[in-house]
Amino acid sequence: MTIELLIGSISLFVIAIFLGFELITKVPPTLHTPLMSGANAISGISIVGALIGANVVYEGLDTSISGVLACLAVVLASINVVGGFAVTRRMLNMIAGKKKDKA
């Protein structure tokens, strides 16, 4: 890896962190839970990418740090998806409960 590529990658990472922070702080608190539902799709994409990374590692029988990180990425993204669906289900139950009380 050349130094130019490393500097470019680090710069992109820092810009992504800054942009993500700015976007999240501009969202009103009432929209955070509905946006979690959309974040599940992004976590699903992360799972697919981590599975592809883990598959490449295990086909070559490589037990380096990249294999450990790929497996860790699968586990963490799966936890994020399950938690997101749990929050979404709870939110929908709260809305459904309010509709039943009004009827």
Image (tube, helix red, strand yellow):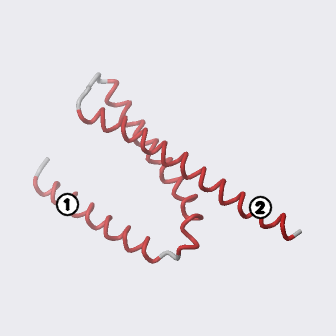
The residue at the far right in this view is: 103
Under circle 1, the secondary element is helix
> Between residues 14 and 91, which one lies in front from this camera angle?
91
Q: Quadrant of residue 3?
A: bottom left
Q: Nearer the viewer, residue 84 or 39?
A: 84
Residue pointed to by mark 2 = 96
- At horizontal 37% and vertical 70% (from top left) the residue drawn is 21
Task: Decide: few, some or many residues near mark 2? Use Cα within 10 Å; few <14, some 14-19, many ≥20.
Answer: few
Please provide percent x and percent y for residue 69: 31, 38
Q: How many neighbours does mark 1 have within 10 angstroms: few (below 14), some (14-19), or many (20 or more)?
A: few
Q: Quadrant of the C terminus?
A: bottom right
Residue type (three-letter) at the residue carrying disc 2: Ala
Q: Quadrant of residue 56?
A: top left
Q: Which residue is mark 1?
A: 8
- Number of marks drawn: 2
Up/down of 82 relative to 14, above or below: above
Which residue is painted at 52% across and 47% down in the image? 81
Q: Residue, x 60% and y 50% (percent of image)?
A: 86
Is residue 76 depicted above or below 61 in this figure? below
Instruction: State which tag comes first along the sequence, 1 or 2.
Output: 1
Three-letter code, disc 1: Gly
